Image: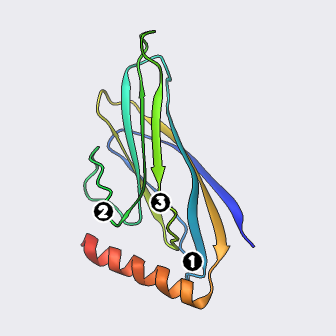
Amino acid sequence: MSKIKSFRGKIADGEQDTVILHTNDGSIGYKIVKFRIVGDQPGAVTSEHTVKIYKVKQSTIDALVDFSDQTLLGMGFYSTNPSTAYSDTDTVIFDSEVFNQDIYITHTETNASNPVNYYIELEQFKLDLNQNTVATLKDIRNETLAI
């Protein structure tokens, strides 16, 4: 049986948030089912936000998006402009990969230094021994690659 857990927050430009998900035995799995971002002043200021979700802590926080990065779980881009000629736009893409460890959210604002709000829904479910082993080995591999 699965259930949905939601997480939300406000993250400053150039910052990284951690969502604590790990357990002692890794028997709980998660996958992203919803990911949304919105600026803290929609339509009032000009801003361009890039928010990314990773499986490992990031040493560099930037706006570059690389879908070949196996540690990237999802990304969102949100832009707004107070001019009536522009409307708020957003693009959100996420992977349906199963993970059982903490996730890390990064934010870059390329136009100013405005913060952004994020909302993430994760499907939580019990992993059998094989799923637990696969997810844990992937996490160990990703940690090794990040070093």
Q: Which residue is mark 2?
A: 69
Q: Which residue is pictured at 50% across the width and 87% down the height?
A: 133
Type of amino acid under label 2: Asp
Q: Position of residue 146 (x, y in %)?
A: 27, 70
Q: Nearer the viewer, residue 103 or 89?
A: 89
Give the Cα distance between marks 2 and 1: 25 Å
Compared to 146, does 128 lie above or below?
Answer: below
Residue at the far right: name it.
1
Q: Position of residue 65 (x, y in %)?
A: 30, 49
Residue 95's tag is: 3
Type of amino acid under label 3: Asp
Q: Nearer the viewer, residue 98 or 6?
A: 98
Q: Which residue is mark 1?
A: 23
Density class for disc 2 (Cα within 10 Å; few <14, some 14-19, many ≥20) is few
Q: Which residue is pictured at 64% across the width and 53% down the height?
A: 6
Type of amino acid under label 1: Thr
Q: Which residue is pictured at 49% across the width and 67% down the height?
A: 97
Q: Which residue is pictured at 49% across the width and 23% down the height?
A: 41
Q: Position of residue 60 (x, y in %)?
A: 25, 54
Indicate how the structure is coloured in the image. rainbow
Compared to 133, does 120 lie above or below?
Answer: above
